[in-house]
Image (tube, rainbow, N blue to C red):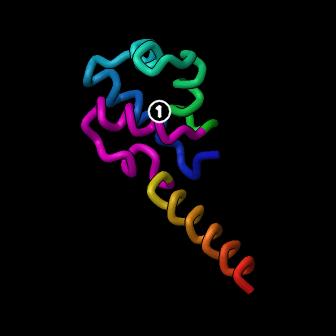
């Protein structure tokens, strides 16, 4: 799913900051597997990505380069749908 492999970068930041994925899972009330899937880029979660970025003090777009464009694409698609409804 991820366009580039940023897992090693995220893992390095986690280690540097002393943050364990298990602690993130506990704090967010999700499974450890969910955290691993997001870190590896196999799944996406705005909530998990934002939390990890904030916890590491790194811009989310640096950890998940496509994260900042997803919302814009979604809004554009919704705008297209809305314009078809008006006609």
The reply to whether the magenta stretch includes residue 64 is yes
Q: Which residue is mark 1?
A: 48
Q: Residues within 10 Å of mark 1 (few under 14, many from 20)?
A: some
Compared with 55, 33 (above or below) is above
Q: Number of callouts in the render?
A: 1
The reply to whether the magenta stretch includes residue 7 is no
Magenta-drawn segment = 44-66
* Residue 28 % position (x, y): 45, 21
Quadrant of the snapshot with the C terminus: bottom right
- Residue at 44 percent across and 13 percent down: it is 26
User: What main secondary structure does the magenta stretch of the protein show?
Assistant: helix
- Residue at 40 percent across and 17 percent down: it is 27
- Whether residue 85 sits left or right of residue 46 in the image: it is right
Between residues 28 and 32, which one lies in front from this camera angle?
Answer: 28
* Residue 77 % position (x, y): 64, 69
- Whether residue 47 sits left or right of residue 62 in the image: it is right
Compared with 81, 27 (above or below) is above
Q: Mark 1 falls on what kind of element? A: helix
Compared with 74, 54 (above or below) is above
Between residues 28 and 60, which one lies in front from this camera angle?
Answer: 28
- Whether residue 16 sits left or right of residue 85 in the image: it is left
- Residue at 70 percent across and 82 percent down: it is 86
Q: Residue furthest front?
A: 86
């Amino acid at each position: 799913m991820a366009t580039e492999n940023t897992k090693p970068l995220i893992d390095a930041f986690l280690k540097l900051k002393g943050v364990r994925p298990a602690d993130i899972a506990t704090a967010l009330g999700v499974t450890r597997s969910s955290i691993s899937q997001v870190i590896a880029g196999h799944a996406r979660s705005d909530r998990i990505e934002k939390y990890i970025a904030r916890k590491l003090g790194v811009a989310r777009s640096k950890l998940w380069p496509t994260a900042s464009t997803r919302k814009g694409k979604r809004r554009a698609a919704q705008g297209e749908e809305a314009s078809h409804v008006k006609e």
